Amino acid sequence: MQLQCPHCQKTNRIPDERLGDDPVCGACAKPILSGVHPVGAQGLTALQSQSAIPVIVDFWAPWCGPCVGFAPTFAAAAQKFGGQLVFVKVDTEANQDLGARYNIRSIPTLAVFKGTSELGRVSGALPPRQLDELIQRVLQGGQV
Ligand SMILES: [Zn+2]
């Protein structure tokens, strides 16, 4: 699949079987999965069908103050847990089809997927500690 490096924005082609091994960017050599990836419908579908690790999606929009305020919390978690989950964000303004497909009623909404099944979602900007706890639960196979 193709993923944009969150550090230098170069598009990398990653073989499916390497998604779980913390691949590094061909251009800047930083870990590709330890960052937040902006995706659209195609990228999200590709990740859901190919990623061996859970995918956590931040549904947001540029005009949403709480979403913008939550971005650093999400980015910090992506640094901490990169390689264990894939962190992506979907701009629901630019991708209204995705907001509709996942029935996103308020933003920010965080949804976690394992393959194509949704493990659960929470709405609202989580404080860092609650986001950490949510991720730990996902990694332990629990509820979102
Ligand atoms: Zn890079």
Image (cartoon, rainbow, N blue to C red):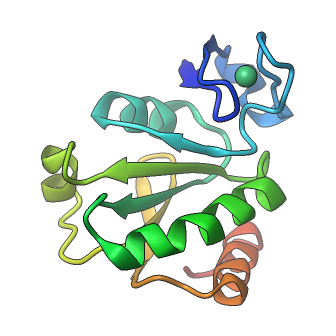
Observer-nearest of 11 and 53: 11
Residue 15 placement: quadrant: top right
Q: Quadrant of the C terminus?
A: bottom right
Q: Can see residue 7?
A: yes
- Is 10 on the left-hand or right-hand side of 111? right
Tell me what residue is drawn at x 61 percent, y 53 percent.
54
Residue 40 quadrant: top left
- Name which residue lies at 75% across and 67% down: 139
Which image quadrant for residue 105? bottom left
Relative to 74, say whether 54 is above or below. above
Residue 12 in the image: above or below residue 107: above
The residue shown at (50%, 46%) is 115
> At which x and y percent is residue 86?
63, 47
Left or right of residue 49: residue 4: right
Residue 56, image x, y percentages: 54, 58
| Location of ligand 1 given as a quarter of the image | top right
Work out whether residue 72 or residue 42 is closer to the camera in this orientation and state it.
72
Q: Nearer the viewer, residue 62 or 77?
A: 62
Above or below for 2 versus 72: above
- Residue at 67% across / 24% down in the picture? 8
